[in-house]
Image (tube, grey):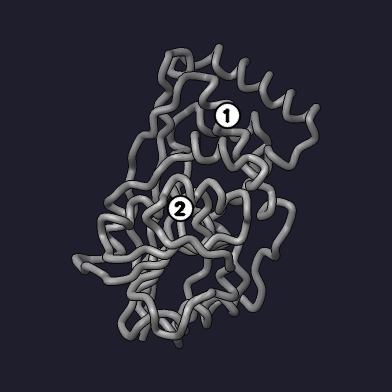
Amino acid sequence: MPAESAMPASEFSRSFGERADSYQRMRPTYPPAAVDFVLHGRSPGRVLDVGAGTGKLTRLLLDRAEQVVAVEPDPQMRRVLSSAVPDAEVLAGSAERLPLPDASVDAIFAGQAFHWFARPATDHELARVLRPGGVVGLIWNMPDQSVPWLPELAQAVRQPEATESDDYQDLDTALFTPAEQDWTSWTYPLPGLAGLRELVHTWSWVITRPAAEQQAIDERLRILATRHAELQGETIGFPYRTMTVRQYLR
């Protein structure tokens, strides 16, 4: 069963809009294998991307469905989303209040967003708009902490110990089948240390820091790069492990 409450809307969840253009440039896409795991060989007619941001996941859905709807609450993120993914239908709304009719989509995705949604209201709203037998896919890109410089990076930016997926709990199993998980390891290329810095400045716990602390983070990144040869080239490979969860509507 889901928790009776989840991380409420906060300065963290509302922080991304001011960095929407950087988010679009620097945030990673998602591995196609994650989307394929959710769809499991299906060719859905209509797919929904909830908390779509600037459309990083939305793009991957265009080739896999007849129609893609992207719902995003932040107007600055929607501005970039509409420009970046013009073939998707972009709507203002939230996971707790979707601007869609009952039983109107075959699959629902959330990339790097589900931990912000209020529970259990979201569970019931997703079930409302899904068609019978529809699927929900929840996806998170997470830094691969087995790579030695990644834990040092987390310390340098004062990343909270809990990751985004730590806030995840399965959708209500009275409404959905038990969760199935899949993991994909992959590497995202960044344009050198400047690219790594810009990526870091799209993370909520960095965006919300005072300017002086953000400057201190930049200095710690510079020092970190002097200790690791893989951070000194024109391209930095950022290693991710992507967690994907799927559950079907009962």
Number of marks present in the image shown? 2
147 left or right of 23 in image: left
Q: Which residue is drawn at 66% across and 55% down?
A: 13
Q: Which residue is drawn at 45% across and 85% down?
A: 102
Three-letter code for the amino acid on which mark 2 is drawn: Trp
151 left or right of 111 in image: right
Q: Which residue is drawn at 43% across and 36% down?
A: 146
Residues at circles 2 and 1 in contact by the CB criterion of under 8 Å? no
Q: In this view, does 20 lie above or below 192?
A: below
Across and down, in percent, residue 46 comes to 33, 70
Three-letter code for the amino acid on which mark 1 is drawn: Glu
Query: Residue 198 bears which disc, if any?
Result: 1
Q: How crowded is mark 2: few (under 14 residues within 10 Å), some or many (20 or more)?
A: many
Across and down, in percent, residue 85 comes to 41, 50
Across and down, in percent, residue 171 comes to 48, 75
Q: Nearer the viewer, residue 13 or 239?
A: 13
Q: Residue at x 26, y 70 (%)?
A: 44
On-image quarter of the C terminus: bottom left
Query: Residue 140 bears which disc, if any?
Result: 2
Secondary structure, mark 1, is helix
91 left or right of 105 in image: right
Secondary structure, mark 2, is strand
Q: How crowded is mark 1: few (under 14 residues within 10 Å), some or many (20 or more)?
A: some
Q: Nearer the viewer, residue 209 or 105?
A: 105
24 left or right of 30 in image: right
